[in-house]
Image (spheres, grey):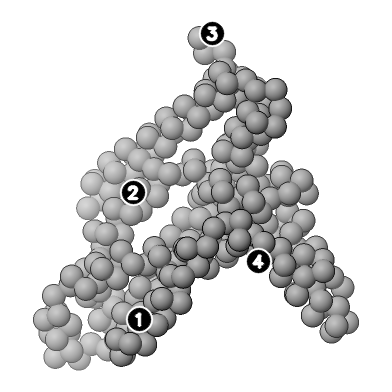
């Protein structure tokens, strides 16, 4: 059918909403999620005592091994109208807040739960990069009178710069993948206007209505082309800058 299915993407309001939500959610993820594992790795690296460091690293890494359906159930138990948070609010004399059905709270909840679940796991690669830094650089910084913050800024961060840049390029290349599993299990009809992304949109038009595999495939290909374009662009820009 030529470009008919691709033209349909830009003439379907639901598809345009999904594209906008995908971009907005992923750009916000770069701001609120991408730096968190780096900060956690820097904090763990600054801790004294290997045993304590390993304990904290295990605690932060453990949530990664929970599936999103379990995490969404935990969130629901805590934040639903009859959940722990609203029960405490009611006991204190405050009104209950329907947090899971509030469009304004849905995206912050996405970022918070993703950081809680994945920041420990994602920090491992930064921890590995930090261990590869030459210890003599820290010794030289100590001789020069640098404090712990200055060592982090002038030694640790430059030492893991290549790792940060590489992972940032890969993150940009996934900008059209806003986290299907997390959003699929956490969204509901009340927040669909701010939570429906391309992946959930393709799922709904393929499995929850009369399937149109040509259109679904066109949406998937459109997403892949945008990801590839952004990946190559980010790589080119980084090479120009550094």
Circles 3 and 1 in contact, beta carbons < 8 Å: no
Q: For numbered disc 2, what is the local secondary structure?
A: helix
| Distance in Å between CA atoms under marks 2 and 3 | 35 Å
Q: CA distance from mark 4 to mark 2?
A: 32 Å
Residue at figure coordinates x 35%, y 48% from the top left? 170
CA separation, marks 4 and 1?
26 Å
Q: Nearer the viewer, mark 4 or mark 2?
A: 4
> Tag 1's secondary structure?
helix
Identify the residue position indicated by label 4 in the image.
Answer: 74
Q: Do the residues bearing badges 2 and 3 touch, measured as CB atoms within 8 Å?
A: no
Evaluate if marks 3 and 4 touch, with contact meaning CB atoms under 8 Å apart: no
Distance from disc 2 to disc 1, alpha carbons, whole Å, reads 29 Å
Q: Is residue 41 left or right of residue 7?
A: left
Q: Which residue is mark 1?
A: 54
Indicate left or right for 212 with 81 as reference: left
Asked which quadrant contains residue 48, the reply is bottom left
Is label 4 in a helix, a strand or a loop? helix
Direction top: furthest residue: 1
Q: In the image, which is nearer the foreground, mark 3 or mark 1?
A: 1
Q: Quadrant of residue 8?
A: top right
Q: In this figure, which residue is indicated by the disc labeled 3?
A: 1
Q: Position of residue 69 (x, y in %)?
A: 61, 56
Mark 2 neighbour class, 10 Å CA radius: few under 14, some 14 to 19, many 20 or more: some
Q: Are marks 4 and 1 in contact (CB under 8 Å)?
A: no
Nearer the N terminus, badge 4 or badge 2?
Answer: 4
> At numbered mark 3, what does the secondary structure look like: helix, strand or loop?
loop
């Amino acid at each position: 059918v030529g470009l008919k299915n691709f033209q349909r993407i830009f003439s379907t309001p639901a598809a345009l909403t999904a594209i906008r939500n995908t971009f907005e959610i992923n750009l916000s993820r770069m701001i609120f999620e991408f730096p968190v594992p780096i900060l956690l790795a820097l904090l763990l690296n600054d801790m004294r005592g290997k045993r304590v460091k390993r304990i904290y690293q295990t605690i932060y890494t453990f949530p990664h091994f929970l599936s999103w359906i379990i995490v969404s159930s935990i969130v629901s138990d805590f934040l639903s109208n009859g959940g722990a948070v609203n029960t405490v609010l009611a006991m204190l004399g405050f009104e209950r807040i329907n947090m899971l059905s509030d469009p304004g709270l849905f995206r912050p909840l996405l970022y918070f739960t993703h950081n809680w679940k994945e920041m420990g796991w994602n920090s491992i690669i930064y921890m590995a990069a930090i261990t590869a830094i030459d210890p003599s650089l820290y010794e030289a910084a100590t001789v020069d009178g640098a404090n712990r913050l200055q060592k982090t800024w002038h030694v640790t961060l430059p030492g893991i710069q290549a790792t940060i840049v590489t992972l940032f390029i890969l993150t940009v290349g996934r900008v059209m993948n806003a986290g299907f599993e997390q959003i699929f299990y956490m969204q509901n009809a009340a927040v669909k206007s701010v939570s429906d992304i391309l992946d959930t949109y393709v799922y709904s038009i393929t499995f929850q209505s009369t399937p149109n595999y040509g259109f679904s495939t066109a949406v998937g290909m459109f997403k892949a082309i945008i990801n590839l374009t952004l990946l190559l662009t980010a790589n080119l820009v980084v090479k120009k800058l550094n």
